[in-house]
Amino acid sequence: MLLGLLAEGERHGYELKREHDARFPAARPLAFGQVYATLERLRKSGLVSAATSVKVDGPQRTPFTMTPAGRDEFERWLTEVQPPSPYVANPLSVKVTLALLTAGEPLAQDFLRRQRDAHLGRMREYTRLKSRPDSSLAEVLAADYALTHLDADLRWIDAALERVAELNKELHSCPVR
Amino acid sequence: MPGSMTLPDHIHSPEIPRETVLSGRALVKDYGNAPALRGVSVELGRGEILAVTGPSGSGKSTLLLCMAGVLRPDAGEVHFQGRRIDTDSETDRSLLRRDSFGVLFQFGQLITEMTAAENVALPLLLSGARRRPAMMTARDWLRRFGVEALADQLPTQMSGGQSQRVAVARALVTEPAVLFADEPTAALDTVAGEQVMTELTRVARETGTAVLLVTHDARVAAYGDREIVVRDGLCSS
């Protein structure tokens, strides 16, 4: 991400941090330390170069620019298709299976219902965020991304609730050993 | 699992206790072949938006119709503002719906021979308002929903989303105590549906109208303050 932000021109660490936070409201908060550590790693790999430090509004700041190798690497990354995640790791499913094996159907159902409430609660928060008149389009799209994934989980929870009795029978009729 | 997007503190609004405006107690309704409701109780707070979800055929629309006084439950009671209403005559329940309730369905609720403004003015005219002020109020409400440009158009000249926004304006124009909305966005695409829900909930909150929102879609339910799930005629959460 930081390399990509340097494609627009020279930036120092403080500017990159500010631009990152404004452009990617859904991303994990980025600490200043992380920005400088990443820039140093990119510099060592030859993807960015550092100019002489200058004094800007008080502190000394080092401007960074993208090198030709950095531009090649960024363009390669930009045009590369992101592999669709297989979404096979499902911690909710693991809990349901273990609840059925060790405690029985009521606990599995209770867990699924409480998980459903938690998911819908989080969906309400994102819905309020995106419905605010002052939300930017970037914030709306980030909330939509979160909502779509939460909704997929919630549909799975509903399907699991419908079939939990069937799954219980299957688990207890097919011992692995 | 939930993403990492940071939410401002005021987005996590705590639940506020509300005075009950409408309640259903142990409601039972049987259509003959199978019971649609088997003892559902529900309370709706003043200004609250309550989502009623559940699989298709679970009884959620029947619950809405009983709460709105359209159907009379076989057993149980419905109270509006502290007064029992399910034992009222059909005429009294019709008057109650006209004066205190708004209704909104999936589609097909506008009168096709009337313009958007005439459709929105209709509930005011039925309540005894004069035509000229009713039409002016209707235009104001169309403006609130961003469809004032459609005031003189017929429903057949509008898109599904536009038509549903006019229907929402008509359902809220009398500032009812309760709005009953049954799958209000089911016939719309995602963007149009979200526009309708955003505007419906914004205006309902402004006017203090409570909303009983029946939906099978969690993304629509997420516009509510709270959810109850109806499964096989019973309330499961």
Image: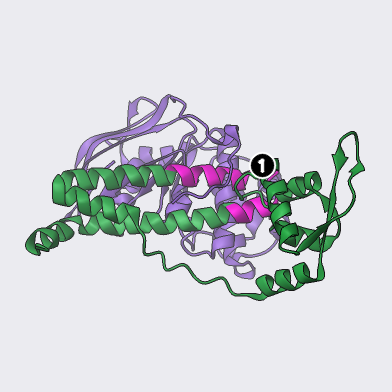
Query: Residue A147's x, y, as percent?
Result: 50, 53
SS for callout 1: loop
Can I make out residue B118 in this image?
Answer: no
Q: Which chain's residue wears label 1? A: A
Q: Residue furthest front?
A: A44
Corner quadrant of residue A7: bottom right
Check the picture and name the quadrant holding the C terminus of chain A: bottom left
Quarter of the image for the N terminus of chain A: give it: bottom right
Is-magenta flag for residue A127? yes
Q: Nearer the viewer, residue B67 or B1?
A: B1
Answer left or right for B136 relative to B44: right
Residue at image point 51% right, 50% down: B3
Judge whether residue A1 can be spotted in this image.
yes
Q: Residues within 10 Å of mark 1 (few under 14, many from 20)?
A: few
State the image coordinates of residue A33 (x, y, percent, origin top left).
Answer: 68, 42
Magenta stretch, main secondary structure class: helix
Which of the two residues, B9 or B109, is positioned nearer the viewer here? B9
Q: Is residue A130 above or below residue A46?
A: above
Q: Give the colour chain A carries in the figure.
A: green
For the colour purple, the matching chain is B
**What span is colored magenta in the figure?**
A121-142
**Image position of B68 with respect to B158: above or below:** above
Mark 1 lies on residue: A31
Q: Is residue A137 magenta?
A: yes
Inspect the image, locate mark 1, and give the three-letter code of the amino acid beneath it: Ala
Looking at the image, how many numbered discs can be counted on the residues? 1
Q: Residue at x 22, y 47 (%)?
A: A109
